[in-house]
Image: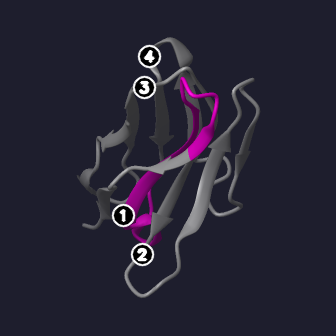
């Protein structure tokens, strides 16, 4: 089995910064694409940023220039550096990864999420 565990969420004032982490553990032969999603109350889940195994990245227009996604493949960990945070960034942030298991099957996994609240 594989687990994804997010950390780093919390309460921050507008204009502040947070760094989220997503650590994968378990029976992992490799990890392909990884991504951060978020869901605000009453809204649908949306893609925030994604990163391929080769390091190519993509971002939602709403976070472009403020958020940076990265990964440490040796640690099976992905990060999201969030700067210039706005109240509208408030949401539960979840990580997602396509993991290659030792059975040569790629499966998609989700973390349980971490709350980010931007408020004065």
Q: Nearer the viewer, mark 2 or mark 4?
A: 4
Pointer 3 residue: 27
Q: Which numbered disc, 1 or 3, marks the residue that appears first in the sequence?
A: 3
Placement of the C terminus among the 4 image quadrants: bottom left
Spatial distance from mark 1 to mark 3, Cα to Cα? Answer: 26 Å
Q: Residue furthest top?
A: 74
Asked where in the image residue 93 lies, by quadrant, the reply is bottom left
Q: Which residues are magenta?
A: 85-107
Spatial distance from mark 4 to mark 1, Cα to Cα? Answer: 24 Å
Left or right: 24 in relation to 60: left
Q: Residue furthest front?
A: 103
Q: Of residues 82 and 42, which is closer to you in this image?
A: 42
Q: Which numbered disc, 4 or 1, marks the residue that appears first in the sequence?
A: 4
In the rendering, which numbered label is found on residue 40? 2
Q: Are marks 2 and 4 in contact (CB under 8 Å)?
A: no
Pointer 1 residue: 92
Q: Is residue 93 magenta?
A: yes
Q: Which numbered disc, 4 or 3, marks the residue that appears first in the sequence?
A: 3
Q: Of residues 33 and 100, which is closer to you in this image?
A: 100
Q: Which numbered disc, 2 or 3, marks the residue that appears first in the sequence?
A: 3
Circle 4 crowding by C-alpha within 10 Å: few under 14, some 14–19, many from 20: few
């Amino acid at each position: 089995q594989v687990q994804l565990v997010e950390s780093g969420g919390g309460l921050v004032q507008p204009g502040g910064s947070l760094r989220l982490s997503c650590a994968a553990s378990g029976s992992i032969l490799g990890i392909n694409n990884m991504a951060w999603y978020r869901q605000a109350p009453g809204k649908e889940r949306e893609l925030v940023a994604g990163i391929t195994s080769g390091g190519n990245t993509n971002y939602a227009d709403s976070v472009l220039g403020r958020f940076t996604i990265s990964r440490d493949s040796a640690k099976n960990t992905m990060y999201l550096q969030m700067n210039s945070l706005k109240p509208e960034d408030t949401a539960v942030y979840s990580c997602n990864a396509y993991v290659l298991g030792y059975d040569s099957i790629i499966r998609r996994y989700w973390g349980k999420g971490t709350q980010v609240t931007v408020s004065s």
